[in-house]
Amino acid sequence: MIWAALLAVSAGIARREHIGIGMFILNTPKPVQRTVLFCVDLIALCAFLYLAIYGFDFAVGGMRRQAMIFGMTLALPYAAVPVASLLAAIQLLLVALRDQGRFVPIDLAEGAE
């Protein structure tokens, strides 16, 4: 269940399904939206990379702990944090590149061809 919940984060990122951030960006003036979206994506990317780096240490620490019910180490459940964070960071980077490309004015796009 931990894995499913954390891996669902990257699916939400792919569709930009965060109501608060979406409403914030839509309520900014059109000329400012690209900059705001870039800043929000950069902050989120840093947060996910931070979670991935420190989540790895968390998962390694879980190798020394045992689950009472199953008798297994907690490394596998704890590994959901760095894996899902890294996947979310990659997904966010791809979505950010996609969405920043949508804001290119038509004149610039036609001049490049």
Image (cartoon, grey):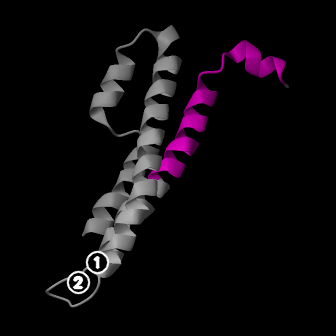
Q: Is residue 54 magenta?
A: no
Q: Which mark is residue 74?
A: 1
Total number of numbered discs in the rendering: 2
Residue 17 appears in which quarter of the rendering?
top left
Left or right relative to 103: residue 21: left
Look at 51% across and 26% down and name the residue there.
38
Q: Residue furthest bottom?
A: 71
How far from the left and from the top, in percent, is residue 64? 30, 80
Q: Quadrant of the N terminus?
A: bottom left
Q: Which residues are magenta?
A: 88-112
First of labels 1, 2 by sequence position = 2
Picture coordinates of residue 59, whole percent (x, y): 37, 69
Examine the rendering and report whether any part of residue 15 can be seen. no
For mark 2, what is the residue? 66
The amino acid type, in three-letter code, at marker 2 is Gln
Q: Are marks 1 and 2 in contact (CB under 8 Å)?
A: yes
Q: Is residue 14 left or right of residue 27?
A: right
